[in-house]
Image: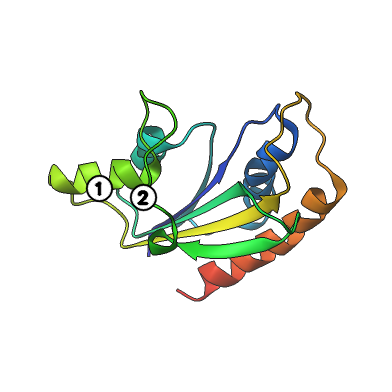
Amino acid sequence: MKTIVIGVGNPILKDDAVGIHVARELKKIIKNKDIEIDEAYTGGMNLLDLILGFDKAIIADSFIGEKEGEIRKLTINDISSSRSLNPHGLTLIESIEMARRLGETKIPEEIMFYVILLKKYPSEFGEELRTKVRAAIPKAVNMILEEISEK
């Protein structure tokens, strides 16, 4: 099974980079040629381009929630298809829906999200992560490794 794992975030916007940190840790561990690890700094159509052609996509990202540092596993069906706040951009869900309508056949059968909760969206520049967010990285890495080994 050809799998891609993508860490999403902004590497200079503090806790928003947590998905990228997860991907970087996985790169140190995973040596299977059928598993590609990548980083993405934007979502929507750019993220869709990265996952096309794979059987399975696993996306590590941050998400706003009450319990900072908690990790949630979600499927594509768990994610809202609400409209992007950016009038010129599309969410990943909107991008996938549009690609399917246009006849795209290389969309992964399975798309999973491992999100690390943040209390609020980071508004300060910097590369350091808050303690609870940083502590979630090894847990997210282990959860993704388990997900990959189940194939």
Which amino acid, mark 1? Glu
| Quarter residue 68 falls in | bottom right
Pointer 1 local density, CA inside 10 Å: few below 14, some 14–19, many at least 20: few
User: Quick check: can you spot residue 31?
Assistant: no
| Horizontal relation, residue 110 to residue 123: left or right | left
Which amino acid, mark 2? Ser
Q: How is the image coloured?
A: rainbow
| Horizontal relation, residue 55 to residue 86: left or right | left
Residue 133 coordinates in the image, percent (x, y): 78, 50
Q: Which labelled disc corresponds to residue 81? A: 2
Residue 69 coordinates in the image, percent (x, y): 75, 56
Quadrant of the image for the C terminus? bottom left
Pointer 2 local density, CA inside 10 Å: few below 14, some 14–19, many at least 20: some
Q: Which residue is mark 1?
A: 97
Q: Secondary structure at mark 2?
A: loop
User: Quick check: can you spot residue 11?
Assistant: yes
Say which residue appears at 41% left-offset and 36% top-offset: 84
Say which residue appears at 44% left-offset and 32% top-offset: 85
Dots 1 and 2: beta carbons under 8 Å? yes
Between disc 1 and disc 2, the foreground one is 2
Say if 50 sits above or below 76 in the image: above
Residue 49 coordinates in the image, percent (x, y): 34, 38
| Quarter residue 31 falls in | bottom right
The Cα atoms of the two marked residues, 1 and 2, are separated by 9 Å
Question: How many numbered marks are there?
Answer: 2
| 1 or 2: tag closer to the N-terminus | 2
Say which residue appears at 67% left-offset and 61% top-offset: 71
Q: Secondary structure at mark 1?
A: helix
Quadrant of the image for the N terminus? bottom left
Residue 55 coordinates in the image, percent (x, y): 34, 60
